[in-house]
Image: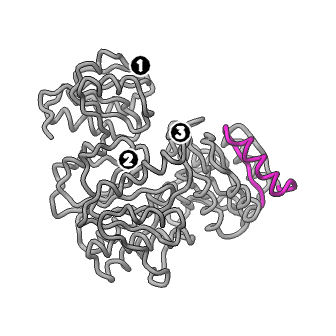
Amino acid sequence: MDWSGKRAVVMGLGHFGGNEAAVRFLCRQGANVVVTDLADEAALREPLERLSDVPVASYRLGGHRIEDFHDADLVVVNPAVRPGNSFVAVAAQRGATVLTEIELFWRSCPARIVGITGSNGKSTTAAMVAAILRAAGHRVHLGGNIGRSLLDVLPEITPDDFCVLEISSFQLWWMTDAVVGPAVAVVTSFSPNHLDWHGSVEEYRAAKQRLLGFQRKTDAAVIDPADEELRRWIPAVRGRWAPPVPSEEVPELAVPGKHNRFNARLAMAAARELGCSEEALRHGLTGFRGLPQRLEWFAVVEGRRFYNDSASTTPESTVAALESTDGPVWLIAGGKDKGCDLTQIAAAAVRAARGAAFFGSAAGRLLEEVAVVDRGFPTAAVETAAAALRWCFDRSRPGDAIVFSPGFASTDQFRNYRQRGEEFVALVQSLTGRTVRRGASAQQLPFD
């Protein structure tokens, strides 16, 4: 695609870097770029500083202007923009191409693409696939919803490379029929989520299934037939269908939990479809150490182990965290209530934890669900994560684990899940006043 001389509107600069990379990409191509965002200059200070040397034609901050969309040739929309947005509709009616940053990359990418979606486990599965491909000697680029746009490195990508993309339902909803592939698709799981955005579970399911609809007969899709919901998706596979590998073939992993062993089963199946050797499968997975903010054991304070699982944005993720943590557990959960079923998370908390503190807009409903399971279970509903941490710390003992696994979106109190996790680490640090060194291994924890 050549956007030289075209008028491009980048709608929603955001903080994760996707549309920021789109701005750089389009300006490099010679497009006339307008950046518009509902947030003001102060809120967008960091991405604006990173774009200070980019020749953006104009910024419209603190609100959108309809006239900016009237004559646009291209609108790059932040995936979080809801369907039916009136500004996007005006641009589309006047003939503009409307797509997201990930599609802007996808249409230009010369490499083979592995696309991974699902309600839970997609980030870890994507990272595992990338680890196996690297162990096989391939050059791999990991990006998408996992938090890194690959537009910035597009000039370096060759047809011999692999691009592993984690893809959200929002990104899939916005994708156009011009997308082709991926060479291998992986669907990790499906459970109702983001119903506040999609409107219904049917629309959410349809968005996820779009990944299969882009594929060709030469492509492959990894789907678990043991999952009753996903088994019904198999007839939609256009190429080869591949099940996860058997459990006994998964090597010993450094990351805990049966959910991670299942993620590895999916990753191994995908890698086999791409021609990786059995040796590469073993080496890639045994060397995999997990992802930041995904059940990350980062500190010990007065004998209590602290885990940062801020990337948990669904109740199912929190259930997996509880089932994967050894020893007595105190749970901190909560955030923006998206209307999900809370039966499983309540039952898991009572079954696997000594107590739980809930915060944010979901706190009240979580408290009610737990009371249905066990009215005597130690729990509290508080306003903030700081208050939840203090409640758990005061009741825990040396040898216990305090697990921050929210299970909900972060946007009721935080900018995103990353900021939420960083704030939690800072709160733990405040318990002692000693600096938490991020990235420390479990064998070299920052303090005890």
Distance of label 2 from label 3 (alpha carbons): 15 Å
Query: Within 10 angstroms of label 3, few (less than 14), some, or many (20 or more) residues?
Result: few
Q: Is residue 104 magenta?
A: no
* Numbered mark located on residue 199 in the image: 3
Marks 2 & 1, CB-CB < 8 Å contact: no
Q: Quadrant of residue 62?
A: top left
Q: Earlier in the sequence, mark 2 or mark 1?
A: 1
Comparing labels 2 and 3, the label whose residue is closer to the camera: 3
Return the x and y of residue 438 as percentages of the image width and height.
49, 55
Q: Secondary structure at mark 2?
A: helix
Where 396 falls versus 26 (above or below)? Answer: below
Viewer-proximal residue among 369 and 38: 369
Q: Secondary structure at mark 3?
A: loop
* Numbered mark located on residue 427 in the image: none
* Numbered mark located on residue 172 in the image: 2
Q: Earlier in the sequence, mark 1 or mark 3?
A: 1
Q: Secondary structure at mark 1?
A: loop
Viewer-proximal residue among 285 and 218: 218
Query: Within 10 angstroms of label 2, few (less than 14), some, or many (20 or more) residues?
Result: many
Give the amino acid at mark 1: Gly
